[in-house]
Image: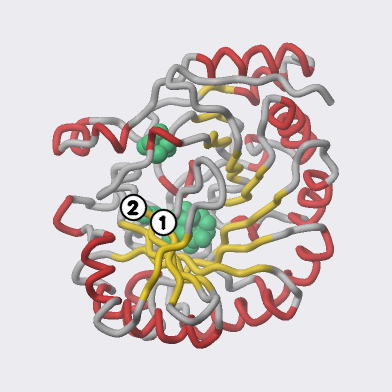
């Protein structure tokens, strides 16, 4: 395959693609899908509006030709999508794709980890915001105990998957549980990544005062651990990485709010209904599903994506203000997939 090089208005290449495979979830995390909004009557996408595996495969071929080599499957909860392993198998065979990853809340891993690995999944990020059950249940708002997620993590490791943990830290909610999480995953030799609470969507009641910054987390962590920086592995690596001194175990920080990284953002997002977003905080997406269902061929789809990426000038986190937080219409996290 001959690659076509595309760059946006700020010379950022297109390197990785996140695909949300479903907008539904078995959790109702307070910072992502609060029950008041995502209640019993919430209208999730009907099945025929989700991209089919054939459609996803065609689009990934287009993106791979334009420089994407990494795919991350997400949601909603991606493990709720039936036969996900089949999709992984197909994506893994696409020329140019050399890294297939998944982000999940983990509870369905006990049943699925081995088949995901066998299908060619390389890496998995499991979200877990506290070990303490009272705190974790208050966050997931679905009565799920942290031990259910830990069992999923165990299953993923047993299957041979590389596992990382994502912890979203929200002030007054779980910031007192940072050291407990760090100690536990250090002992297990698993990378833990702290994610600053973000103003994605409009339903999670976000404001600046609820964010625990990397600086604050770092101060807390260094009361107990000695940390040394680890160099970024490639252009556009999002996490700021550190290692516990004298070990190979790492921790990372995703500093979307306190130290934005838009200048090296090479990520595109495909929502479950086929809308293509050039930024996590975009107000609108481009309807690729319509083009696919109208019968556009590979070249026509490719031209469309090249034009969209070529016109991209997003740098929301660089420009975030009280004003943009309040007034900008944004897509919900569970739909766009994080
Ligand atoms: N359901 C899966 C999960 O929870 O891992 C995948 C989808 S979830 C939207 C992807 C990631 O986004 C998770 O790690 C989650 O914790 C994170 N996330 C959700 N809402 C967030 C927010 N407001 N700020 C920061 N991270 C958030
Ligand atoms: Fe579901 Fe993941 Fe959102 Fe939690 S963060 S509600 S598990 S999609
Ligand atoms: Fe990329 Fe948009 Fe996030 Fe900036 S705000 S890093 S452009 S997704």
Q: In this view, does 233 lie to the left or right of 39?
A: right
**Dot 2, crowdedness within 10 Å: few (<14), some or many (≥20)?**
many
**Dot 1, crowdedness within 10 Å: few (<14), some or many (≥20)?**
some
Earlier in the chain: of badge 2 and badge 1, it is: 1
Q: Is residue 293 left or right of residue 33?
A: right
Callouts 2 and 1 close, C-beta under 8 Å: yes
Observer-nearest of 240 and 226: 226
Q: Would you name the residue on which mark 1 appears?
A: 240
Kindly identify the residue that appears in the image at 45 percent across and 86 percent down: 184
Kindly identify the residue that appears in the image at 43 percent across and 33 percent down: 279
Q: Where is residue 33 in the image (x, y as percent from the top left)?
A: 39, 55
Kindly identify the residue that appears in the image at 21 percent across and 38 percent down: 325
Q: In this view, does 198 lie to the left or right of 8?
A: left
- Mark seen at residue 57: none
> Would you say the beta carbon of the disc 2 residue lies within 8 angstroms of ligand 3?
no
Query: Quadrant location of ligand 3?
Result: top left
Observer-nearest of 171 and 9: 9
The image shows residue 317, relative to residue 275, as above or below, that is: below
Kindly identify the residue that appears in the image at 22 percent across and 71 percent down: 219
Q: Would you name the residue on which mark 2 appears?
A: 255
């Amino acid at each position: 395959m001959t690659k076509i090089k595309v760059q946006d208005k700020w010379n950022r290449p297109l390197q990785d693609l996140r695909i949300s495979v479903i907008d539904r979830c078995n959790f109702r995390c307070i910072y992502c899908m609060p029950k008041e909004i995502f209640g019993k009557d919430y209208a999730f996408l009907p099945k025929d509006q989700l991209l089919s595996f054939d459609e996803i495969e065609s689009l990934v071929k287009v993106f791979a030709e334009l420089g994407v080599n990494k795919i991350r499957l997400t949601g909603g909860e991606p493990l709720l999508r039936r036969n996900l392993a089949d999709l992984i198998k197909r994506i893994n065979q696409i020329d140019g794709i050399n890294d297939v990853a998944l982000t999940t809340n983990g509870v369905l891993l006990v049943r699925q980890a081995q088949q995901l690995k066998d299908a060619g999944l390389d890496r998995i990020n499991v979200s877990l915001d506290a070990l303490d059950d009272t705190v974790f249940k208050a966050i997931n708002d679905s009565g799920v105990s942290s031990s259910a997620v830990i069992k999923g993590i165990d299953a993923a490791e047993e299957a041979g998957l590389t596992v990382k943990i994502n912890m979203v830290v929200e002030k007054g909610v779980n910031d007192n549980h940072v050291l407990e999480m760090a100690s536990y995953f250090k002992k297990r030799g698993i990378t833990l990544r702290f994610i600053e609470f973000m103003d994605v969507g409009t339903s999670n009641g976000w404001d600046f005062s609820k964010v625990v910054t990397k600086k604050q987390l770092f101060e807390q962590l260094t009361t107990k651990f000695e940390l040394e920086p680890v160099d970024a592995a490639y252009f556009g690596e999002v996490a700021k990485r550190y290692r516990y001194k004298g070990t190979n175990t790492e921790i990372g920080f995703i500093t979307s709010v306190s130290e934005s990284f838009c200048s090296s953002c090479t990520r595109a997002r495909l929502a479950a209904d086929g809308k293509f977003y050039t930024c996590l905080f975009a107000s609108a997406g481009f309807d690729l599903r319509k083009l696919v269902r109208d019968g556009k061929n590979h070249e026509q789809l490719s031209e469309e994506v090249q034009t969209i990426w070529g016109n991209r000038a997003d740098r929301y986190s660089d420009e975030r203000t009280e004003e943009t937080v309040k007034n900008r219409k944004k897509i919900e996290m569970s739909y766009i997939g994080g």
